[in-house]
Structure formats: structure tokens, C-alpha cells
Amino acid sequence: MNNKKIEKSNKKLLNQMFWRSFLLQGTWNYINGAGVGACYMLIPFIKKIYPNPEDKSKRTAALKRELGYFNITPALSTFPLSIAASMEEKNAKLPDFDATSINAVKASLMGPLSGIGDSLFWGTIRVIAAGIGIGLAKTGNILGPILFLLIYNVANIGTRYYCLNLGYNLGGEFIEKAYKNGLIKILTKSAGILGMIMVGAMTFSTVTLGTPLKFKMGSMTFKLQSILDQIMLGIIPLSLTLGCFYLVRKKVSPNKIIILMVIAAFILSAFHIVG
Amino acid sequence: MFGAALSVAFVMFLGNISDSGLSDLMIRRPLVMSTIVGLLLGNLQKGIVMGASLEVIFLGMSGIGGAMPSDYMTGSIFGTAFAILNHQGTSVALSLAIPISLLAVFVNQLVIFIRGLLVSKFNDLADKDNIKGIEYLHYASIFFGPIIYGIIGFLGIFLGNSSISLLVHSIPNFFMEGLTVLGKILPALGIALLINMIHEKGNMLYLLLGFLLASYLKLPLIAIALFGVILAVIIATTDRQILNNKNLITDTNFQNKESNSNLLEEDFFNEQ
């Protein structure tokens, strides 16, 4: 880490950005994602960079720039936006700075960071926290929901705070280098691996479909479920999930899959094929 | 009933504003929502237990804004509230939560659509250099969704509870069984959407690894997570060594960057 001392006034602005990050998704929509929230987080910086009335055209340009499409796992939102803040400052100072690179850096970070964030925060930390919480809550223990919120949010809010200085210090150049030397790729890959392991574990614990089917052969009764278990434990949940994933990949809309599921559930349960 | 309706309206408001106004602290998960419903309707124990069962069903369902296949928050709140108000058990809470969560999706879509109409307004404000205007409109739009949800929560309980209680007592058996099976199938879709978010070329094998650790070894999630972290770090380290060797040839400054990358990695891997 390059231990560049952050000026006091900028520390204050970064703290403002942190508090504003809680309102990131207030205007979430399909047109510019959380773009309004991103702009809202950068407003303190924009105000400081262009304080004078005669800077109006530059200020509106910055506002419009930051209103562009932005979407990311909220826990990591402060990282690209504090980078954007330091770039906006450079843009005001250096006459030959290319302002379009600000949006380019934001856009190039969104995808990989959301990949890392989704894997880590939704795929892993949320699942662990829920696993612990459900275990306690099953017996009616109030610690269940409390621990769930605590575990998730210590990680969520802590990361959000830590990323402020990280992004502001690194600035855009580091990101370009990190892309070039493949660091981002490595992080994305590792987070994806961890996320997939957790999602796999979750498949077994949440899709609990079995079959009560029996068939007689002479004097022997075979339970279909135990035969399936001998082939592979949890073969029904796994194939069901992978089948769903196949449909999602084939761009079948989730709503259609749900309708299929409703029909299948009622037919299969009416004939006692599953239970 | 008026008091109960107000309580549910409050929980709906709280759950939705935790997403728009607190950037998703997971307060809107079934585990938390059902607990708060239980607390306000005077049966905390029941609320917590129902929350645990609902969380299992909806664990795979996440998704901010985007393509939410089911509104697990609304389903959980109503399912728990109706079950507690009618002195029913967890199975009734589950069987009501599932259809309600499927029906309520369009509310979320509507809220997002209306927010989308504001985007051009925001751009106009930016053109006029009206920073205050941007901030206030953003505040207003934060409260818009939660208020809609609160109203739905109030009306749903105030007008719906008597008909729901009739319904609960007259649900035929085959219908309950069908809903139970649906509750066992539905998580597969949530997980499929999660896989779609996370998967990349070559990591489907790790899905199987996690599955096998859970099925054959019966490991708790936290143990699987720890193994997963170790494996991810090992793979990242090997990858970096390969990169180092490549970069040493082309880039002599890599040593300085390595300290950066270490920090980054620690940040991402030591979150637990």
C-alpha cells in the first residue's frame, strides 16, 4: 500500500461517502441501475472540486457523468466510487486528463467486482450466516436472527469502510495495471471457486425433494429412494438444480420456470411420486 | 385487527427500506422479518421458528432489484402473520408464504419501473446544476417503495385476514401436499440463479465438490466455507506465482505491486 497521507478534509469527504453509501440503492432502476446513488455518494467531492459558480459547466458535466449506469454488490460500492473520486480530482487539476476514463474505470470494475462480491457476500458470507442463524432459530432461539445480522453486516459494513481509503489511494492507474497483470482475474476466479463450493453445499441443504415410490418384485420390496441413494446421495436435488440452471442458461425466464414447477409439484404430489 | 395490520405494515416498510435506504443489510431476509412479525404480534417464539423454516426455502433466492423470481420478503411476512393470527403452525406459514411470494413479485417490478421514470428528471436536475434537487429527489425515491409496501401490508391484513382464515380451514389436503412439494422444489430455482451469477468457465466442478462435502461428509456450512477459503487461497497463490514468473520477464516493478496485491487478497479472503 502506498501510504499516501490523505488530507484531513478528504478524510471527511470519504467519511461522508461512507454514510451516503447506505442510500446507494434508493433509486435502483433498470435504466441506470444504482447510478443515482453513485452520483449521490460523489456529490461531496464534486462540490469540493468545483466550488465556484463559474465552474457550473464542469460541475454539471461531472454530475451527469456520475449519473451513468452503475450497479455493484453494495458491500464493494465504495471501492470504484472512491477511485472515481480521486480521478475526478485529477480531472479538475490536469488539463490533459481524459474524463471519459473515469466512467471507463467504473464500468470495467463493475463486472469483476460484482462477480467477486456476489460470490463472497451472497454466495458465501450470507449462506454461512444463515446456516448459523437457522441452526439456532429452529429451536426458537432469538440469537439466530441476531447472529445472522451481526455476522453478515460486520463483513458487509467493514468492507465498505475499508474500501474507501483503498480505492482512493490506489486510483485509476493501479486498476489499469491490475488488469494488465491479471490480478483482477485471479481474485475473480478464486472468489468464484469459493462461491461455487458454498452454493453446492447449499443445494444439498435446501432442495430436499425425495421419492416415496416402492415397487415389489416377488417377495422383495424395493424403495426407489434407497436405490437412488446408493447411486449417489442427493441425486434428485442435484439433477433438479442443474436442470433449472440449464433452463436459466437457455434464457427461459424465471417466471416460466416457476409456472413449470407449480404444475410439476401438484401433478407429482397428486400421484405420490415425490414427497 | 387494526393493530396487527399496523404492525405488519411497519415490518413491510422496514424490510423494504432496509434495501433502498440501508443498502441491503439483509434485514429483509425471512429469518429476520418473521422474527419481527412474531415479536409485534405477541408470539416471538413462533415467529423465530417460522423464520428459520422460511429461510431454508428461500435461501437461494437473492437478487437486488433485478430478476427476483419471488418476493420472499412479502411472502414471509404475510405467511408468518396469517399463521400467528389464526393460531396455525409452521406448515400453514410455509404454504401461504409460497403463493404470496410469487404473487407479490409484480409490486417490486412496478416500484422499479416508476423509479426508472425519474432518471430523465435526475438528468434535468444535473443539467440545471441543482445538487440539492438531486439529493431531495433521491430521498423521496428511497421512501416511495417502502410506503407502497407498507400500504400493501396494512390492507393485506386488515381486509384479507378473515378470508385467509376461512381459506386456511378449508384448504383441501392434496393442495397442501402440492404446496409442500413446491417448497422442496422451489429452492432449486433460486440456487440455479445464484449459479448463473457466480459460474465461470471451469468452476462447475467446485459446485459438485461443495455438494459432495455436504451430502456424503455431512459437514456444516461453516466447515465447508473454511475448506473453501483454504482452497481458494491455494489456487490464488499458485496463479500468482505463475503470473509473477511471467511478469518478472516483462515488468521489473512487480515487487512493489506485490505488496498491493497481498493487501487486496487479505481484504477479500479474511472477511470471515
Image (spheres, coloured by chain):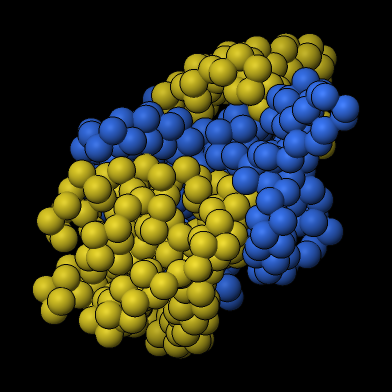
Chain colours: A blue, B yellow
Q: Which residue corresponds to the image point at 56% horizontal and 56% vertical from the top-left?
A: B177
Residue A90 in percent (x, y) is at 49, 52
From the viewer's side, name the closer residue of A13 and B43. B43
User: For residue A158, what is the image quadrant?
Assistant: top left
Q: Which residue corresponds to the image point at 31% horizontal and 43% vertical from the top-left?
A: B49
From the viewer's side, name the closer residue of A40 and B69. B69
From the viewer's side, name the closer residue of A17 and B11. B11
Q: Which residue corresponds to the image point at 60% horizontal and 39% vertical from the top-left?
A: A208
B62 lies above or below A236: below
A169 lies above or below B83: above
Residue B95 in percent (x, y) is at 46, 60
Residue A84 in percent (x, y) is at 49, 53
Q: Image check: A210 left or right of A145?
A: right
Q: Which residue corresponds to the image point at 12% horizontal and 56% vertical from the top-left?
A: B42
- Residue B217 visible within the image: yes
Residue B107 in percent (x, y) is at 46, 78
Name the outermost residue toward the front: A219
Q: How many marks?
A: 0
A183 lies above or below B117: above
B250 lies above or below B241: below
Q: Image check: B149 left or right of A188?
A: left
- Residue A181 visible within the image: no
Q: Image check: B109 left or right of B94?
A: right
Name the outermost residue toward the right: A218
